[in-house]
Image: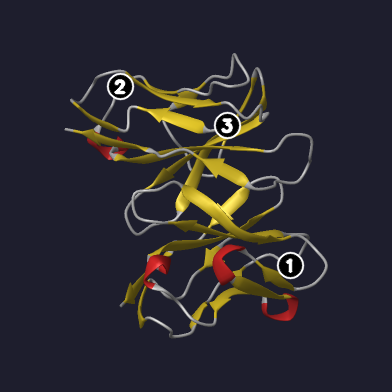
Amino acid sequence: EADIYQTPRYLVIGTGKKITLECSQTMGHDKMYWYQQDPGMELHLIHYSYGVNSTEKGDLSSESTVSRIRTEHFPLTLESARPSHTSQYLCASSVSGTVRINEQFFGPGTRLTVL
Amino acid sequence: AQSVSQHNHHVILSEAASLELGCNYSYGGTVNLFWYVQYPGQHLQLLLKYFSGDPLVKGIKGFEAEFIKSKFSFNLRKPSVQWSDTAEYFCAWGYQKVTFGTGTKLQVIP
């Protein structure tokens, strides 16, 4: 079944650790996105990719980095986690082949807590 | 900066009541407009979308939204809500990238 997966779902980690949040989709979408969402706040776009080897920063400045070596995989990395990184991270993908954005499919999210 | 405003942060309704959630966006050019819903414990998913054509858009589960260009609005409506509509609703708009509103938590009381 075509879907979008995120692991881990929950992560509690100490300050200074390096972490990677995984995102994979089986729908063959070229476009993928990472959003950050705090409780009661809007989703903020932090990274996006229009295809393999294409990554761009989003509207919200983030200390995280991303890579897109394979179409289906779009991991997000924090080299040194800090308490200010505590948030929910949502991965999404959308239909390929169009300039303007279409429906986005979202993963379940990773809730990150940095102590 | 481009923005989306959702005026109602938390709405409580009884079953069978009518629903209207407000959404305003800040840009007057070409837009794609969306409403997404997140049911408790589930992924965010598309409820309906508007790109062009008939400004009254029908979505899943009896929801509809009306695009009013002069008011920069895209309000979500449902004539009669059910307990199963309890969820968080997000308005979004954009062209190549999407900007989301802060969301409205809807609680439907049986």
Mark sitting on residue A67:
none
Chain that bears disc 2: A
Question: Which image quarter: residue B14?
Answer: bottom left
Residue occupied by mark 1: B28
The nearer-to-camera label among 1 and 3 is 3
In which quadrant is the C terminus of chain B drawn?
Answer: bottom left
Q: Which mark is residue A2?
A: 3
For the residue pair B88 and A2, the one nearer the viewer reads as A2
Give percent across and percent down for residue A15. 20, 26
How far across and down, in percent of the image, does residue B94 sit?
66, 54
Quick one: quadrant of the N terminus of chain B?
A: bottom right
Q: Compute the Cα span from label 1 to label 3.
A: 35 Å
Amino acid type of the residue that numbered disc 2 sits on in the rendered structure: Ser
B8 w.r.t. B30: above or below: below
Q: Earlier in the sequence, mark 2 or mark 3?
A: 3
Residue shown at the point (16%, 32%) measured from the top left = A115
How many angstroms separate mark 1 from mark 2 (CA)? 41 Å
Residue A30, relative to residue B37: is it above or below?
above
C-alpha gap between disc 2 and disc 3: 33 Å
Q: Amino acid at mark 3?
A: Ala
Which amino acid, mark 1? Answer: Gly
Q: Residue at (68%, 64%) from the top-left corner?
A: B27
Is A2 on the left-hand or right-hand side of A75?
A: right
User: Which residue occupies 46% across, 75% down?
Assistant: B7
Classed neighbour count for the residue bearing mark 2: other residues with Cα under 10 Å, few (<14), some (14–19), many (≥20): some
Residues at circles 1 and 2 in contact by the CB criterion of under 8 Å: no
Towards the viewer: A43 or A30: A30
In the shown orientation, is residue B94 left or right of residue B81? right
Q: Is residue B36 above or below residue A102?
A: below
Helix, strand, or loop for circle 1? Answer: loop
Q: Position of residue A85 (x, y in %)?
A: 31, 36
Badge 1 sits on which subunit? B
